[in-house]
Structure formats: C-alpha cells, structure tokens
Image (spheres, rainbow, N blue to C red):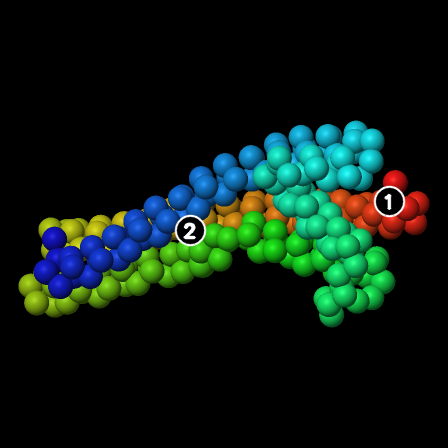
Amino acid sequence: MGNGTTSLAVTAVLWTLLLFSVASWTVIIVNGWRQWRMGRINRAFAARFWHAPDLGTGSREAESHDAPLARLCVAGSRELSALRSGTNDLAHRGEVGDILERTLRQQVQKEQTAMESGLTLLASVGSISPFVGLFGTVWGIMHALQDIAKSGSAGLDVVAGPVGEALIATALGIATAIPAVLAYNFFLRRVRVAVAEMEHFAADFLHLAIKTERNGGR
C-alpha cells in the first residue's frame, strides 16, 4: 500500500464519488416515482375532464387531482373567474384570450421548473465524476512512482497496492457517471414530453374557455 498521504487522498476521492453516487441514485428514485405518479394522475384527470359536460364541471374535477394538468386547469379557471368578477387591476387588463394564454404559459413554466428539479445534479455528477476518479488515479500513480524512486525497486510488491487503489478511483468514477448520464437523458426526455402535453392541454383549454365566454359562460 502507498504512503499515508496517498491513501488519504485516494480515500477522499473514493468517498466523494460514493457521496455523488448516493445523491444521484436518490434523485433517480425520487424522480422516477414522481414521474410515474404524475403520469398516472394526469391520465386519470384528463379522462374525467374531457368527459365533463361543461368547463365548470371539468374545472372542479381539477381540485381533487394533484398533477400538472390539473394545476394548469386550476390556474386557468381561477384566472377566468377573476376576469368574470370584473377585476380591473393591471394584471387583468386586456383581451380575455391574451390574459388566459399568459396565465397558462406561466403555469406551464412553473411545472417545467418543478419537473426539472434534480436534473442539474445528475448532469453535474455525470460530467465531473470521471474527472474526480481520474484525479484519484493520477494522484495514486504519481505517489507510486515516488515509492519506486525511494525504494529503488519497481517490483510488484512496491507498486501493486497504490496503483490498484488508484485504478479503483477511475472505475468508481465511471460507475458513478454512467447511471447519472443515462438518468439525465431519460428524465429530460420525459420532461419534454410532459411539457408538450401541457402545452396541448393549455391550447385546448384556452379555446374552450374563449368559446364558453362567447356563449355566455355555458
């Protein structure tokens, strides 16, 4: 085994990579469960909303569902109610369609931001873990070469310990990075699909709301 400084530095790298791995797997598990739950509730709400007899009934369905589409519907319905009540502040001046579109767009952005939570950590872990592992490897090999110089021997008993310890750092860095990168790409695609779904729902809700207002709220 290498000297104390070598072991301490490489051990610190290994523990850092272990913490990175735990953090990334925590995000993966939490986001995976959240994505599954979100998709299930979204489908249930969408089915009930589009089978409702009118916009008011469909909007009330949203109150009992905790999902992005439901919150989007709630935001649009509350804005529509505020417009109907004659609120005359600056935020509610303009065409009904423009105000509703702005509200729905803002809600979509809020939902997107919430769904992207944790992705920055996955991207960071995926990017820097191999370099952290490589640092541990270079440090270990550098001190292994110093051990060779001090002992005057390049025998296996001199270099095996520190070099083996150093190579473990590289392997752990790669093992930490791969799941983080794969999960990041997977969740990023799921977020894009979810955002597209929300944008389609927002457009349909807007058209339905405008049509309802033209028909006198029916």
Describe residue 100's horizontal placement relative to residue 117 as left or right.
right
User: In whole angstroms, how far apart are the C-alphas of marks 1 and 2?
Assistant: 54 Å
Disc 1 marks which residue?
217
Q: Which disc is residue 177 wearing? A: 2
Q: Position of residue 83 (x, y in %)?
A: 78, 56
From the viewer's side, name the closer residue of 46 and 60. Answer: 60
From the viewer's side, name the closer residue of 218 and 20. Answer: 218
Residue ranking furthest to the bottom: 90
Describe residue 203's horizontal placement relative to residue 163 as left or right.
right
Q: Position of residue 89 (x, y in %)?
A: 73, 67
Task: Tell me: residue 119, above or below residue 89.
Answer: above
x 79%, y 29%: residue = 51
Q: Residues within 10 Å of mark 2 (few under 14, many from 20)?
A: many
Q: Position of residue 198 (x, y in %)?
A: 71, 47
x 62%, y 35%: residue = 64
Check disc 2 and give the amino acid type. Answer: Ala
x 75%, y 61%: residue = 87
Q: Position of residue 211 (x, y in %)?
A: 90, 47
Q: In front of the other: label 1 or label 2? A: 1
Q: Residues within 10 Å of mark 1 (few under 14, many from 20)?
A: few
User: In what element is the residue under mark 2?
Assistant: helix
Check disc 1 and give the amino acid type. Answer: Gly
Residue 171 can be seen in this image? no
Residue 56 can be seen in this image? yes
Q: Count numbered badges in the picture.
A: 2
